[in-house]
Amino acid sequence: MTTAQAILSDRPAQRWLVTGAAGFIGSHLVEALLRGGQHVVALDDFSTGHRRNLEDVRAQVGEAAWLRFRLVEGDVADPRAAAAALSDVDHVLHQAALGSVPRSIEQPMRSFHANATGFAQLLTAAKDAGVRRVVYASSSSVYGDHPDLPKVEDRTGKVLSPYAATKAIDEVLAGAFARSYRMQAVGLRYFNVFGPRQDPDGAYAAVIPKWSAAFMRGETLWINGDGQTSRDFCYVDNVVQANLRSALVAELPTEHEVFNVAFGTRTTLLELAREMHVALQRHTGRTLRFELAHREFRGGDVRHSLADIGKARTLLGYAPTHDVHAGLDATMAWYAARLA
Protein backbone atom coordinates (compact mmCIF):
# COMPACT_ATOMS: atom_id res chain seq x y z
CA MET A 1 0.00 0.00 0.00
CA THR A 2 1.36 3.41 -0.95
CA THR A 3 1.39 6.33 1.47
CA ALA A 4 -1.42 8.00 -0.49
CA GLN A 5 -3.55 4.87 -0.29
CA ALA A 6 -2.88 4.61 3.45
CA ILE A 7 -3.99 8.23 3.95
CA LEU A 8 -7.22 7.58 2.02
CA SER A 9 -7.88 4.03 3.22
CA ASP A 10 -10.31 4.92 6.00
CA ARG A 11 -11.87 7.91 4.26
CA PRO A 12 -15.37 7.85 2.78
CA ALA A 13 -15.61 8.53 -0.94
CA GLN A 14 -15.71 12.28 -1.56
CA ARG A 15 -15.44 14.60 -4.55
CA TRP A 16 -12.10 16.26 -5.26
CA LEU A 17 -11.31 18.97 -7.78
CA VAL A 18 -7.82 18.80 -9.29
CA THR A 19 -6.95 21.75 -11.50
CA GLY A 20 -4.17 21.24 -14.01
CA ALA A 21 -5.11 17.56 -13.88
CA ALA A 22 -3.48 16.70 -17.21
CA GLY A 23 -0.14 18.06 -16.06
CA PHE A 24 2.73 16.26 -14.39
CA ILE A 25 1.78 16.73 -10.71
CA GLY A 26 -1.95 16.95 -11.37
CA SER A 27 -2.08 13.58 -13.11
CA HIS A 28 -0.31 11.92 -10.17
CA LEU A 29 -2.89 13.41 -7.80
CA VAL A 30 -5.73 12.14 -9.99
CA GLU A 31 -4.20 8.66 -10.01
CA ALA A 32 -3.71 8.57 -6.24
CA LEU A 33 -7.26 9.75 -5.56
CA LEU A 34 -8.87 7.25 -7.93
CA ARG A 35 -6.77 4.43 -6.47
CA GLY A 36 -7.99 5.56 -3.06
CA GLY A 37 -11.65 5.19 -3.99
CA GLN A 38 -12.36 8.91 -4.39
CA HIS A 39 -14.32 10.81 -7.05
CA VAL A 40 -12.31 13.30 -9.12
CA VAL A 41 -13.33 16.34 -11.13
CA ALA A 42 -10.48 17.49 -13.38
CA LEU A 43 -10.12 21.00 -14.80
CA ASP A 44 -7.59 21.59 -17.56
CA ASP A 45 -7.33 23.62 -20.76
CA PHE A 46 -4.42 21.50 -22.08
CA SER A 47 -2.24 24.55 -22.66
CA THR A 48 0.67 22.72 -21.04
CA GLY A 49 -0.90 19.47 -19.82
CA HIS A 50 -1.24 16.40 -22.05
CA ARG A 51 -4.17 14.11 -22.73
CA ARG A 52 -1.69 11.23 -22.78
CA ASN A 53 -1.14 11.76 -19.04
CA LEU A 54 -4.82 11.19 -18.34
CA GLU A 55 -4.85 8.19 -20.66
CA ASP A 56 -1.90 6.79 -18.72
CA VAL A 57 -3.80 7.30 -15.45
CA ARG A 58 -6.81 5.52 -16.95
CA ALA A 59 -4.64 2.56 -17.93
CA GLN A 60 -3.06 2.44 -14.47
CA VAL A 61 -6.27 2.59 -12.39
CA GLY A 62 -8.60 0.57 -14.61
CA GLU A 63 -12.04 1.22 -16.07
CA ALA A 64 -14.00 0.75 -12.85
CA ALA A 65 -12.05 3.49 -11.10
CA TRP A 66 -12.17 5.68 -14.21
CA LEU A 67 -15.97 5.85 -13.89
CA ARG A 68 -15.34 8.10 -10.87
CA PHE A 69 -13.52 10.64 -13.07
CA ARG A 70 -15.05 13.67 -14.80
CA LEU A 71 -13.21 16.17 -17.01
CA VAL A 72 -14.14 19.83 -17.32
CA GLU A 73 -12.14 21.24 -20.22
CA GLY A 74 -11.50 24.95 -19.77
CA ASP A 75 -9.31 27.74 -18.44
CA VAL A 76 -9.31 28.20 -14.66
CA ALA A 77 -9.42 31.96 -15.30
CA ASP A 78 -12.79 31.53 -17.07
CA PRO A 79 -15.57 32.11 -14.48
CA ARG A 80 -17.90 29.61 -16.15
CA ALA A 81 -15.30 26.84 -16.28
CA ALA A 82 -14.27 27.46 -12.68
CA ALA A 83 -17.87 27.45 -11.47
CA ALA A 84 -18.67 24.26 -13.39
CA ALA A 85 -15.65 22.48 -11.96
CA LEU A 86 -16.37 23.57 -8.38
CA SER A 87 -19.98 22.49 -8.36
CA ASP A 88 -20.50 20.03 -5.47
CA VAL A 89 -16.87 19.27 -4.52
CA ASP A 90 -15.48 18.65 -1.05
CA HIS A 91 -11.77 19.32 -1.59
CA VAL A 92 -9.75 21.48 -3.98
CA LEU A 93 -6.17 20.77 -5.07
CA HIS A 94 -5.09 23.65 -7.31
CA GLN A 95 -2.14 22.76 -9.54
CA ALA A 96 -2.97 24.70 -12.70
CA ALA A 97 -0.18 27.14 -13.51
CA LEU A 98 2.23 28.22 -16.18
CA GLY A 99 5.62 27.17 -14.86
CA SER A 100 9.21 28.07 -15.75
CA VAL A 101 11.21 31.11 -14.69
CA PRO A 102 12.62 31.71 -18.22
CA ARG A 103 9.16 31.57 -19.79
CA SER A 104 7.88 34.12 -17.28
CA ILE A 105 10.74 36.47 -18.17
CA GLU A 106 9.90 36.16 -21.86
CA GLN A 107 6.10 36.15 -21.42
CA PRO A 108 5.27 37.91 -18.13
CA MET A 109 1.63 38.68 -18.92
CA ARG A 110 0.91 35.09 -19.91
CA SER A 111 2.34 33.92 -16.59
CA PHE A 112 0.32 36.52 -14.68
CA HIS A 113 -2.93 35.49 -16.40
CA ALA A 114 -2.46 31.78 -15.70
CA ASN A 115 -0.97 32.00 -12.21
CA ALA A 116 -2.47 35.09 -10.59
CA THR A 117 -5.70 35.85 -12.47
CA GLY A 118 -6.48 32.13 -12.69
CA PHE A 119 -5.95 31.63 -8.98
CA ALA A 120 -8.06 34.68 -8.08
CA GLN A 121 -10.91 33.25 -10.18
CA LEU A 122 -10.54 29.83 -8.56
CA LEU A 123 -10.69 31.35 -5.08
CA THR A 124 -13.77 33.34 -6.06
CA ALA A 125 -15.52 30.26 -7.41
CA ALA A 126 -14.51 28.26 -4.31
CA LYS A 127 -15.90 30.97 -2.05
CA ASP A 128 -19.17 31.04 -4.01
CA ALA A 129 -19.43 27.23 -3.84
CA GLY A 130 -18.88 27.17 -0.09
CA VAL A 131 -15.65 25.18 -0.23
CA ARG A 132 -14.10 24.98 3.23
CA ARG A 133 -10.42 24.67 2.29
CA VAL A 134 -8.30 25.21 -0.84
CA VAL A 135 -4.88 23.60 -1.18
CA TYR A 136 -2.75 25.31 -3.83
CA ALA A 137 0.68 24.99 -5.40
CA SER A 138 3.08 27.75 -4.44
CA SER A 139 6.81 27.61 -5.12
CA SER A 140 10.23 27.79 -3.47
CA SER A 141 10.88 30.69 -5.84
CA VAL A 142 9.06 32.99 -3.38
CA TYR A 143 12.21 32.88 -1.19
CA GLY A 144 13.95 34.98 -3.83
CA ASP A 145 17.27 36.45 -2.76
CA HIS A 146 16.99 35.55 0.93
CA PRO A 147 20.42 34.05 1.72
CA ASP A 148 19.59 31.66 4.57
CA LEU A 149 19.73 27.89 4.17
CA PRO A 150 17.64 25.93 4.83
CA LYS A 151 14.61 27.94 3.76
CA VAL A 152 12.09 28.52 6.55
CA GLU A 153 8.52 29.55 5.76
CA ASP A 154 8.50 32.88 7.61
CA ARG A 155 11.68 34.29 6.03
CA THR A 156 11.53 35.35 2.38
CA GLY A 157 13.46 37.85 0.27
CA LYS A 158 12.92 39.81 -2.93
CA VAL A 159 11.56 37.65 -5.75
CA LEU A 160 13.79 37.34 -8.81
CA SER A 161 11.39 36.64 -11.68
CA PRO A 162 7.83 37.30 -12.85
CA TYR A 163 7.01 33.64 -12.14
CA ALA A 164 8.15 34.01 -8.54
CA ALA A 165 6.12 37.22 -8.27
CA THR A 166 2.94 35.43 -9.37
CA LYS A 167 3.43 32.78 -6.71
CA ALA A 168 4.06 35.42 -4.05
CA ILE A 169 0.86 37.16 -5.19
CA ASP A 170 -1.01 33.86 -4.90
CA GLU A 171 0.02 33.57 -1.26
CA VAL A 172 -1.21 37.11 -0.57
CA LEU A 173 -4.51 36.40 -2.36
CA ALA A 174 -5.04 33.14 -0.47
CA GLY A 175 -4.51 34.86 2.86
CA ALA A 176 -6.87 37.70 1.96
CA PHE A 177 -9.64 35.34 0.82
CA ALA A 178 -9.24 33.13 3.88
CA ARG A 179 -9.54 36.10 6.25
CA SER A 180 -12.35 37.80 4.31
CA TYR A 181 -14.63 34.84 3.64
CA ARG A 182 -13.98 32.42 6.52
CA MET A 183 -12.26 29.95 4.21
CA GLN A 184 -9.06 28.04 4.83
CA ALA A 185 -6.12 27.95 2.43
CA VAL A 186 -2.91 25.94 2.38
CA GLY A 187 -0.02 26.92 0.13
CA LEU A 188 2.59 24.30 -0.70
CA ARG A 189 6.00 25.67 -1.66
CA TYR A 190 7.30 23.00 -4.01
CA PHE A 191 11.05 22.49 -4.32
CA ASN A 192 12.12 21.09 -7.74
CA VAL A 193 9.58 18.32 -8.14
CA PHE A 194 10.43 15.45 -10.48
CA GLY A 195 9.11 12.04 -11.48
CA PRO A 196 7.36 10.05 -14.23
CA ARG A 197 5.22 11.94 -16.78
CA GLN A 198 7.32 15.10 -16.56
CA ASP A 199 7.61 16.36 -20.15
CA PRO A 200 11.18 16.22 -21.55
CA ASP A 201 10.43 18.28 -24.64
CA GLY A 202 9.97 21.97 -25.27
CA ALA A 203 12.02 25.07 -24.57
CA TYR A 204 10.98 25.23 -20.90
CA ALA A 205 11.39 21.60 -19.86
CA ALA A 206 12.77 21.01 -16.36
CA VAL A 207 16.32 19.75 -15.94
CA ILE A 208 15.67 16.09 -15.07
CA PRO A 209 13.35 15.27 -18.00
CA LYS A 210 15.46 17.35 -20.38
CA TRP A 211 18.68 15.59 -19.38
CA SER A 212 16.99 12.18 -19.47
CA ALA A 213 16.07 12.77 -23.10
CA ALA A 214 19.56 14.07 -23.90
CA PHE A 215 21.22 10.98 -22.42
CA MET A 216 18.87 8.65 -24.29
CA ARG A 217 19.46 10.49 -27.59
CA GLY A 218 23.23 10.70 -27.18
CA GLU A 219 23.20 14.49 -26.96
CA THR A 220 25.31 16.92 -24.95
CA LEU A 221 24.00 18.01 -21.55
CA TRP A 222 24.03 21.77 -21.08
CA ILE A 223 24.63 23.07 -17.56
CA ASN A 224 23.88 26.65 -16.57
CA GLY A 225 26.93 27.86 -14.63
CA ASP A 226 29.71 25.72 -13.16
CA GLY A 227 27.52 22.79 -12.11
CA GLN A 228 27.82 23.51 -8.38
CA THR A 229 24.35 25.07 -8.26
CA SER A 230 22.32 22.91 -5.87
CA ARG A 231 18.66 22.09 -5.44
CA ASP A 232 16.42 20.19 -3.04
CA PHE A 233 14.95 17.73 -5.53
CA CYS A 234 11.60 16.27 -4.44
CA TYR A 235 10.04 13.12 -5.89
CA VAL A 236 6.41 13.49 -6.96
CA ASP A 237 5.06 10.87 -4.50
CA ASN A 238 6.15 13.17 -1.66
CA VAL A 239 4.18 16.00 -3.25
CA VAL A 240 1.07 13.85 -3.56
CA GLN A 241 1.34 12.99 0.12
CA ALA A 242 1.70 16.66 1.10
CA ASN A 243 -1.41 17.62 -0.88
CA LEU A 244 -3.56 14.90 0.65
CA ARG A 245 -2.41 15.62 4.19
CA SER A 246 -3.00 19.36 3.68
CA ALA A 247 -6.55 18.75 2.49
CA LEU A 248 -7.45 16.27 5.23
CA VAL A 249 -5.66 17.50 8.36
CA ALA A 250 -8.34 18.33 10.92
CA GLU A 251 -6.95 21.58 12.29
CA LEU A 252 -4.58 24.33 11.18
CA PRO A 253 -3.11 27.05 13.42
CA THR A 254 -4.50 29.85 11.24
CA GLU A 255 -6.86 30.20 8.31
CA HIS A 256 -3.92 30.41 5.87
CA GLU A 257 -0.73 28.38 6.21
CA VAL A 258 2.21 27.76 3.87
CA PHE A 259 4.50 24.73 3.98
CA ASN A 260 7.74 23.71 2.31
CA VAL A 261 7.38 20.51 0.31
CA ALA A 262 10.75 18.88 -0.31
CA PHE A 263 12.95 16.11 1.05
CA GLY A 264 15.41 18.31 2.92
CA THR A 265 18.69 17.47 1.17
CA ARG A 266 20.79 19.30 -1.40
CA THR A 267 22.16 17.91 -4.69
CA THR A 268 24.43 19.77 -7.11
CA LEU A 269 23.75 19.68 -10.84
CA LEU A 270 26.97 17.76 -11.45
CA GLU A 271 25.99 15.15 -8.86
CA LEU A 272 22.54 14.93 -10.43
CA ALA A 273 23.95 14.36 -13.93
CA ARG A 274 26.26 11.58 -12.79
CA GLU A 275 23.55 9.75 -10.85
CA MET A 276 21.06 10.04 -13.71
CA HIS A 277 23.64 8.66 -16.14
CA VAL A 278 24.37 5.63 -13.96
CA ALA A 279 20.68 4.90 -13.38
CA LEU A 280 19.72 5.22 -17.05
CA GLN A 281 22.52 2.88 -18.09
CA ARG A 282 21.36 0.37 -15.51
CA HIS A 283 17.74 0.49 -16.66
CA THR A 284 18.50 0.46 -20.40
CA GLY A 285 21.39 -2.01 -20.32
CA ARG A 286 23.19 0.34 -22.70
CA THR A 287 26.34 2.44 -22.57
CA LEU A 288 25.17 6.05 -22.84
CA ARG A 289 27.29 9.02 -23.87
CA PHE A 290 28.23 11.40 -21.05
CA GLU A 291 29.27 14.83 -22.33
CA LEU A 292 28.69 18.07 -20.44
CA ALA A 293 28.92 21.65 -21.69
CA HIS A 294 28.61 24.81 -19.63
CA ARG A 295 26.94 28.13 -20.40
CA GLU A 296 26.13 31.28 -18.46
CA PHE A 297 24.16 31.11 -15.25
CA ARG A 298 20.47 31.67 -15.99
CA GLY A 299 18.84 34.96 -14.99
CA GLY A 300 16.14 34.71 -12.31
CA ASP A 301 17.61 31.57 -10.74
CA VAL A 302 19.02 31.24 -7.24
CA ARG A 303 22.39 29.63 -6.56
CA HIS A 304 21.36 27.18 -3.83
CA SER A 305 18.06 25.90 -2.50
CA LEU A 306 17.33 23.72 0.52
CA ALA A 307 14.12 23.35 2.52
CA ASP A 308 13.41 23.06 6.20
CA ILE A 309 10.44 20.66 6.27
CA GLY A 310 9.97 20.72 10.03
CA LYS A 311 6.73 22.72 9.91
CA ALA A 312 5.09 20.26 7.48
CA ARG A 313 6.28 17.31 9.57
CA THR A 314 4.85 18.79 12.76
CA LEU A 315 1.53 20.20 11.57
CA LEU A 316 0.65 17.91 8.66
CA GLY A 317 2.38 14.67 9.58
CA TYR A 318 4.33 14.95 6.31
CA ALA A 319 6.94 12.18 6.08
CA PRO A 320 8.57 12.02 2.64
CA THR A 321 9.09 8.44 1.50
CA HIS A 322 11.48 8.96 -1.44
CA ASP A 323 14.86 10.65 -1.21
CA VAL A 324 16.52 11.88 -4.39
CA HIS A 325 18.24 8.52 -4.97
CA ALA A 326 15.07 6.41 -4.73
CA GLY A 327 13.13 8.97 -6.74
CA LEU A 328 15.74 9.12 -9.50
CA ASP A 329 15.86 5.33 -9.75
CA ALA A 330 12.08 5.14 -10.27
CA THR A 331 12.11 8.11 -12.65
CA MET A 332 14.99 6.86 -14.78
CA ALA A 333 13.26 3.49 -15.09
CA TRP A 334 10.21 5.31 -16.48
CA TYR A 335 12.23 7.40 -18.97
CA ALA A 336 14.28 4.37 -20.03
CA ALA A 337 11.04 2.61 -20.99
CA ARG A 338 9.32 5.61 -22.58
CA LEU A 339 12.27 7.07 -24.51
CA ALA A 340 13.86 3.80 -25.67
Image (spheres, rainbow, N blue to C red):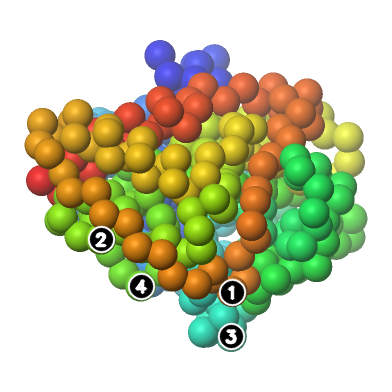
Residue designated by label 4: 203
At horizontal 77% and vertical 62% (from top left) the residue drawn is 145
Mark 1 vs 3: CB contact within 8 A:
no
Residue designated by label 3: 109
Q: Earlier in the sequence, mark 3 or mark 2?
A: 3
Residue 89 percent location from the top left of the image: 57, 46
SS at mark 3 in the image: helix
Residue 48 percent location from the top left of the image: 38, 67
Measure the alpha-carbon separation of dots 1 and 2: 22 Å
Q: Earlier in the sequence, mark 4 or mark 2?
A: 4
Judging depth in this view, the residue of 213 and 241 nearest the camera is 213
| Amino acid on which disc 2 is placed | Thr
Q: Which mark is residue 299?
A: 1
Residue designated by label 2: 220
> How many residues crowd around disc 3 within 10 Å: few (fewer than 14), some, or many (20 or more)?
few
| Amino acid on which disc 4 is placed | Ala
At horizontal 62% and vertical 22% (from top left) the residue drawn is 319
